[in-house]
Amino acid sequence: MVVNIYDTANEMEEQMNKTQEFTALKKAFADMQNDPDSMLLFTKFQSKQMELQKKQQAGQQPTQDEIKEMQDLAQQFSSKPLIKTLMEKEQAMDNMLQQLNEIITGPIRNLYNSVMPNQNNNDQK
């Protein structure tokens, strides 16, 4: 029997859109978008974060001024209730994805556990 795992992944995508976690994330994102101050801060933070990541990927370190700017943005970011709610909902979504990843990668883990069962048991303690 040939299994098309991509069909299963596409089905999971459809189901994920219906989960409580995604629905809450989507609502929190819409609420944040409807607040101009929160949305401006969100886009500013995202842009600065991407800029610094690109710089690090190019092997460059951020300057002290860039680090300070990012810290200031992060502080403002976490003080906005709508953004804070969005981050909480994003964390709940991330938790669900981590659990799904554990399930999906189970066959690989089991494969290696068959060779080194004691090593992995010690990691879980």
Image (tube, rainbow, N blue to C red):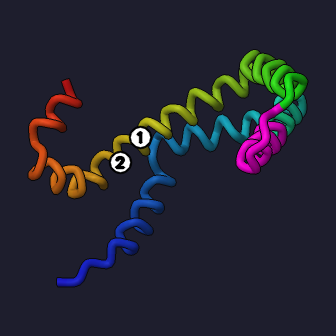
**Alpha-carbon span between mark 1 and mark 2:** 6 Å
Q: Is residue 95 left or right of residue 121?
A: right
Question: x%, y% of residue 95?
Answer: 43, 36
- In which quadrant of the rendered image does the C terminus lie? top left
**Residue 17 circle label:** none
Q: Is residue 88 left or right of residue 78?
A: left
* Residue 48 magenta: yes
Q: Which residue has dot 2 on it?
A: 100
Q: Please tell me in which quadrant of the rendered image residue 43 appears.
A: top right
- In which quadrant of the rendered image does the N terminus lie? bottom left
Q: Main secondary structure of the magenta part?
A: helix
Question: x%, y% of residue 84?
Answer: 67, 23
Residue sitting at 54 percent across and 43 percent down?
A: 23
In this orientation, does residue 22 appear? yes
Q: Amino acid at mark 2?
A: Leu
Q: Is residue 71 left or right of residue 111?
A: right
Look at the image and give the residue range highlighted in magenta. Answer: 47-62
